[in-house]
């Protein structure tokens, strides 16, 4: 029975009310505010008009009073059941944030101190026939941490280290301080009969084309959460069913002891793959517990048959950090996932599905659930299983020392880890457990700098507690103590995984244990060109800022403050040193002078910078085996490293990522004055065969072919196709007025374009765009007379996704772009199409633009291509 109706909330000052009085069934609450459960206090208050949107302007500052109040939830429910012998009732809370006291019919059941756990209370005696009253009181966290030590290192906030809740709620370098409070998970009244199963553990032991061998560990629990006795399990059976649409296997086994393992084989198994390597096939697994023929408990979950491990050393002895899925060494392509919202408990499931759909469409095969956030809800992992996206799972410790000397703290951490490992260990998508985010690395570096003088508090968690629990609960996956970790300096590029913050943060690399961590805040020090120096084995963080889209800014920034250089725009950027973004743009696009230029310059710099880095890492396979961008998403509408802004509008970098993460990548490697190198990266499991051509265009439309190659690229490899001196490639073309194009003649891979010089040094002529809209087909057709740099299609609405956007158009090229409004109808009358070097006009929607005009453009494009071919034949 789910208890999700008739909830109400009210706040009190500390000490204003007596708890036992407020918890009584007859306490008057009809004037309290109606509440949604699951949910959070901020969202409830906003929905009822008590507070303004915390994301608008500086409204988050106006909400600080909320975290200092005592908050009560109350509801009532009907219960009419008759219990039989051997049955009992439990009240289950799947999420409480944070310091809660639970009362049923005026009786205190218990208290909570960990957002990352569920809590269950036996309530058989406390339940009444008919109407029952449930109350939950939340204390302000300041009451629980005010007497705690806060003298040692903790980034962004001192009190957070004592609170087992989402650490980024205390403010981070990409989000504001918004301390959540509330019933953030479901509330259930659950009947138990004699015994129940405690999180069955299923794993693939071996796998061939002919047969998969699976193991299932089962444990039966009795009343009170203790292991069942022999007397209780007498006459019990397990039933295991596996189905792929049709029932493949159904067997019953006697329960001979409370904890045991079963082995069984699946003939001709269908494997689970990441979506880029194959089908993420899922069987349906069901395990039932019977007592004397009556079903008393059931576990059901989709299950993927696959093998997965991390290769840390190649056959030749070289250091590696490569995920091997079903025997295939894959290149991990993806991003870091931060909480989907500052108030995640109030986010609908549709928003999770929408964001994960964008992940797959962005050709990403891995997400890292970052350690300053939260263990995600089941839906997140269900979707990753279904979509074929691997998950690097951090435990929730980030950028701080944690009080591992405190017994109560360690006890709640132990239960948090135990529960979440059991909950997630059967997920096909779960690839790796990681102890924390940056704690090992930053402790050693800051201690070497003299900023930390204490012991490594938290070390016992990552290096003793977690590995011991995983050895017991999930020995099937690699446990990695921290990220980054490995080598001489935990951020070494010679072993393990790394966070490349030379770019953006200006860290001087490499360093060694004991050396000072130096920083170079200069154009050269933060430049994305530094990615080319990185030989890391696996890069689990790297990135740079870009503005949110114009629509998002307009939604949350007051109109009078929506200009470049305003305090409000600066407030959107929570990183301490704002000059880093300026330095990056100064080195590539030049420094923006107004908001229009800032949006374009920051987006282009981020997109081209990430393209530069990812293509370098992918060309370096198998030495480098992964690139996870910091970060995928935003939890609020700010300026950050995200690829997709808070309104679910992809930035330029996301559309670039669709191309530079594609399974087959055609790549141009070039630095000014040096040779041009052409590459093919093939991440597929089969050969890539194609006919490639390399062309040069000037910005006015003159073009020449510079080479053709028939290529056969082996699976899972990077191959250099050609190396051409810059002067030989240019031959009569100017480096600041030309663009390179590497493409497949057969269209078997996406083409790649590159420039000989940085954006600020290009001599771009004013381009005139022609735009035609076909509303029936949800399609825009765009063409240009001269090269159009960074064509940007904008519509005023959330979650509008283009087939392509932020692209370059060659002279005379015709581009058709499909548009999809995933949260609302497409607002065509707000359409704007511009280019970085447009003639100053903004191409707006015009009524009367028809499909006929579009077809005329297509005919013109065919004629242009035909003329190009004839011209080439004459030259030859």
Image (cartoon, rainbow, N blue to C red):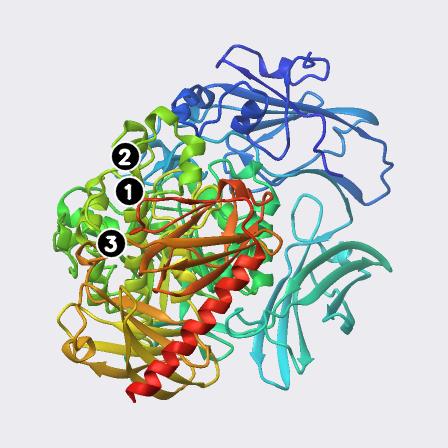
Q: Is residue 764 left or right of residue 180?
A: left
Looking at the picture, does residue 98 appear above or below residue 656? above
Looking at the picture, does residue 430 appear above or below residue 664? above
Of the residues under marks 2 and 3, which one precedes in the sequence?
3
Residue 501 shows which numbered tag? Answer: 3
Residue 564 shows which numbered tag? Answer: 2
Looking at the picture, does residue 812 appear above or below residue 118? below
Of the residues under marks 2 and 1, which one precedes in the sequence?
2
Q: Which one is nearer the viewer's eye here, 800 or 244?
A: 800
Q: Is residue 336 left or right of residue 543?
A: right
Q: Position of residue 112 (x, y in %)?
A: 54, 33
Q: Secondary structure at mark 2?
A: loop
Tell me the CA gap for discs 2 and 3: 26 Å
Which residue corresponds to the image point at 63% horizontal and 74% vertical from the top-left? 214
Can residue 558 be seen at all in this image of the molecule?
Answer: yes
**Residue indicated by mark 1:** 598
Which residue corresponds to the image point at 64% horizontal and 77% vertical from the top-left? 270
Q: Secondary structure at mark 1?
A: helix
Q: Crowding near pointer 1: few (<14 within 10 Å), some, many (20+)?
A: many
Q: Which one is nearer the viewer's eye here, 89 or 641?
A: 641
Which residue corresponds to the image point at 52% horizontal and 39% vertical from the top-left? 344
Q: Are marks 2 and 1 in contact (CB under 8 Å)?
A: yes
Residue 348 shows which numbered tag? Answer: none
Q: Position of residue 855 (x, y in %)?
A: 54, 63
Q: Secondary structure at mark 3?
A: loop
Q: Position of residue 835 (x, y in %)?
A: 34, 51
Q: Position of residue 742 (x, y in %)?
A: 33, 75
Tell me the CA gap for discs 1 and 3: 22 Å
- Location of residue 481 by image quarter: bottom left
């Amino acid at each position: 029975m789910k208890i999700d109706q008739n909830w109400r909330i009210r706040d009190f000052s500390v000490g204003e009310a007596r708890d036992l009085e407020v918890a009584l069934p007859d306490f008057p609450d009809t004037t309290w505010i109606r509440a949604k459960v699951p949910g959070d206090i901020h969202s409830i208050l906003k929905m009822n008009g008590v507070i303004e949107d915390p994301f608008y302007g500086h409204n988050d500052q106006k909400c600080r009073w909320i975290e200092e109040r005592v908050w009560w939830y109350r509801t009532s429910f009907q219960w009419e059941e008759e219990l039989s012998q051997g049955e009992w009732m439990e009240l289950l809370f799947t999420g409480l944030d944070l310091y809660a006291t639970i009362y049923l019919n005026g009786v205190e059941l218990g208290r909570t101190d960990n957002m990352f756990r569920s809590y269950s209370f036996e309530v058989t005696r406390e339940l009444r026939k008919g109407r029952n009253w449930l109350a939950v009181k939340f204390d302000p966290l300041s009451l629980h941490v005010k007497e705690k030590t806060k003298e040692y290192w903790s980034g962004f906030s001192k009190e957070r280290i004592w609170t087992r809740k989402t650490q980024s709620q205390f403010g981070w370098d990409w989000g504001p301080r918004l301390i959540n409070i509330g019933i953030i998970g479901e509330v259930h009244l659950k009947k138990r009969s004699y015994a129940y199963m405690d999180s069955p553990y299923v794993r693939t032991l071996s796998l061939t084309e002919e047969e998969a061998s699976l193991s299932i560990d089962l444990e039966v629990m009795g009343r009170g959460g203790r292991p069942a006795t022999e007397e209780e399990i007498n006459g019990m059976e397990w039933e295991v069913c596996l189905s792929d649409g049709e029932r493949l296997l159904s067997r019953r086994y006697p329960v001979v002891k409370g904890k045991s393992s079963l082995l069984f084989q699946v003939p001709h198994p269908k494997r689970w793959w990441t979506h880029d390597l194959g089908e993420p096939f899922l069987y349906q697994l069901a395990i039932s517990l019977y007592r004397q023929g009556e079903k008393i408990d059931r576990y059901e979950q989709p299950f993927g048959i696959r093998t997965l491990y991390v290769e840390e050393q190649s056959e030749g002895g070289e250091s590696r950090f490569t995920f091997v899925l079903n025997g295939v060494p894959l290149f991990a392509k993806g991003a870091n996932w931060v909480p989907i919202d500052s108030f995640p408990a109030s986010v609908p499931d549709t928003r999770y599905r929408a964001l994960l759909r964008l992940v797959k469409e962005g050709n990403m095969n891995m997400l890292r659930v970052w350690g300053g956030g939260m263990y995600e809800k089941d839906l997140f992992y269900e979707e990753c299983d279904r979509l074929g996206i691997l998950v690097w799972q951090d435990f929730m410790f980030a950028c701080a020392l944690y009080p591992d000397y405190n017994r109560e703290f360690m006890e709640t951490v132990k239960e948090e880890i135990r529960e979440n490992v059991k909950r997630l260990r059967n997920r096909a998508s779960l690839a790796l457990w990681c102890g924390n985010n940056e704690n090992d690395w930053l402790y050693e570096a800051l201690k070497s700098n003299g900023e930390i003088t204490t012991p490594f508090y938290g070390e016992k968690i990552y290096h003793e507690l977690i590995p011991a629990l995983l050895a017991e609960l999930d020995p099937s996956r690699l446990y990695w103590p921290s990220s980054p970790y490995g080598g001489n300096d935990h951020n070494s590029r010679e072993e393990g995984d790394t966070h490349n913050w030379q770019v953006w943060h200006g860290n001087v690399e490499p360093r060694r244990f004991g050396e000072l961590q130096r920083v170079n805040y200069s154009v050269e020090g933060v430049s994305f060109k530094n990615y080319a120096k990185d030989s890391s084995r696996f890069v689990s963080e790297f990135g740079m800022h870009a503005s949110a889209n114009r629509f998002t800014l307009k939604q949350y920034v007051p109109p009078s403050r929506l200009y470049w250089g305003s305090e409000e725009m600066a407030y959107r950027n929570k990183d301490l040193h704002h000059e880093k973004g300026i330095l990056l743009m100064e080195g590539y696009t030049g420094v923006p002078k107004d908001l229009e230029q800032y949006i374009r310059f920051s987006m282009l710099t981020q997109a081209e910078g990430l393209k530069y880095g990812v293509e370098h890492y992918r060309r370096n396979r198998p030495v480098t085996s992964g690139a996870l961008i910091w970060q995928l998403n935003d939890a609020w509408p700010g300026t950050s490293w995200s690829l997709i802004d808070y309104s679910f509008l992809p930035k330029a970098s996301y559309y670039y990522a669709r191309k530079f993460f594609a399974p087959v990548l055609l790549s141009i490697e070039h630095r000014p004055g040096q040779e041009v190198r052409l590459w093919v990266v093939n991440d597929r499991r089969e050969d890539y065969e194609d006919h490639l051509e390399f062309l040069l265009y000037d910005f006015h439309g003159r073009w020449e072919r510079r080479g053709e190659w028939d290529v056969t690229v082996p699976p899972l490899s990077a191959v250099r196709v050609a190396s051409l001196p810059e002067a030989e490639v240019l031959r009569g073309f100017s480096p600041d007025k030309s663009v390179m194009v590497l493409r497949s003649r057969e269209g078997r891979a996406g083409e790649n374009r590159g420039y000989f010089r940085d954006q600020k040094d290009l001599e771009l002529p004013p381009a005139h765009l022609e735009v035609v809209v076909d509303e029936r087909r949800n399609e825009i057709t765009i063409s240009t007379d001269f090269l159009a740099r960074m064509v940007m299609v904008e519509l005023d609405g959330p979650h509008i996704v283009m087939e392509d956007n932020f692209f370059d158009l060659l002279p005379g090229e015709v581009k058709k772009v499909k548009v999809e409004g995933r949260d609302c109808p497409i607002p065509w009358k707000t359409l704007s199409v511009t280019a970085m070097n447009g003639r100053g006009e903004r191409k707006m929607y015009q009524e009367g633009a028809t499909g006929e005009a579009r077809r005329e453009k297509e005919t013109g494009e065919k004629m242009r291509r035909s003329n190009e071919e004839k011209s080439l034949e004459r030259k030859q």
